[in-house]
Amino acid sequence: DAGITQSPRYKITETGRQVTLMCHQTWSHSYMFWYRQDLGHGLRLIYYSAAADITDKGEVPDGYVVSRSKTENFPLTLESATRSQTSVYFCASGRDLSSYEQYFGPGTRLTVT
Amino acid sequence: LAKTTQPISMDSYEGQEVNITCSHNNIATNDYITWYQQFPSQGPRFIIQGYKTKVTNEVASLFIPADRKSSTLSLPRVSLSDTAVYYCLVGGNTDKLIFGTGTRLQVFP
């Protein structure tokens, strides 16, 4: 049982390119989340999803797109990557919003040149 | 969402007890207090959650005074492997998690 996985683990892309980060969880958790982590900012919520086909914005959604056609997958797309989107991206899942007990993936380190 | 304040960093030695205090003066009645741990190059990991008084599990204890305006995460007899960043979060059952910058704990031999 892999739990929650992210791919790729490392990605280098150029400014203006579209990039998709994948997230997959095997727990059938209703909620899934995307965070970015930058030095000096801690983790910031980008988007989250309460169920398939239900998504909502977090603190820093601009420049990102998400979808959730299946409960277990929650891809994050950078439509036109910018250097300011260089970061470590974490996906997480949880049973509900209220439990505060989220399970995080290993992260994807994205560099935009 | 209640704002939290915690020390930026702390140092300790192996075998000592470490107490990390978090201030949350404007905590709401239905807010819970949750702590996460993050090792380098890994995602955060849930440690403990509480509402009032004391909560203990196999990893840590969480002390919450009656006024709930602060909380203290206690790590007994730390080891080198406890070196990590510890986040204190406060919120209610409809809130999204808001992480601050956390407390960086360094444990020395």
Image: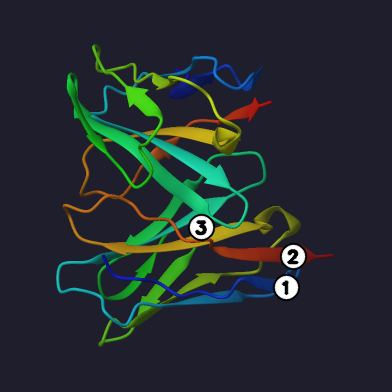
Label 3, label 2: how many angstroms apart (C-alpha)?
Answer: 16 Å
Disc 1 chain ID = B
Pointers 1 and 2 in contact (CB under 8 A)? yes
Residue at coordinates 26% horizontally, 18% vertically from top-left?
A68
3 vs 2, front mark = 2
Rounded to the nearest angstrom, the CA distance separating label 3 from label 1 is 19 Å
Q: Which mark is first along the chain, 1 or 3?
A: 1
Q: Quadrant of the C terminus of chain A?
A: top right
Residue that appears at 65% across and 71% down: B9
Task: Say what amino acid the circle numbered 2 marks.
Answer: Val
Point out which mark residue B59 bears: 3
Q: Is residue B13 above or below residue A24?
A: below
Q: Amino acid at mark 3?
A: Val
Q: Does B44 sit above or below residue A24?
A: below
Residue tagged 2: B107
Please report, as a chain letter, where disc 2 is located.
Answer: B
Q: Position of residue A14 (x, y in %)?
A: 64, 19
> Residue A91 lies in what quarter of the image?
top left
Viewed as shown, does residue A8 lie left or right of B105? Answer: left
Q: Residue at x 40, y 58 (%)?
A: B48
Residue A65 x %, y %: 34, 24
Q: Secondary structure at mark 1?
A: strand
Q: Do the residues bearing badges 3 and 1 touch, measured as CB atoms within 8 Å?
A: no
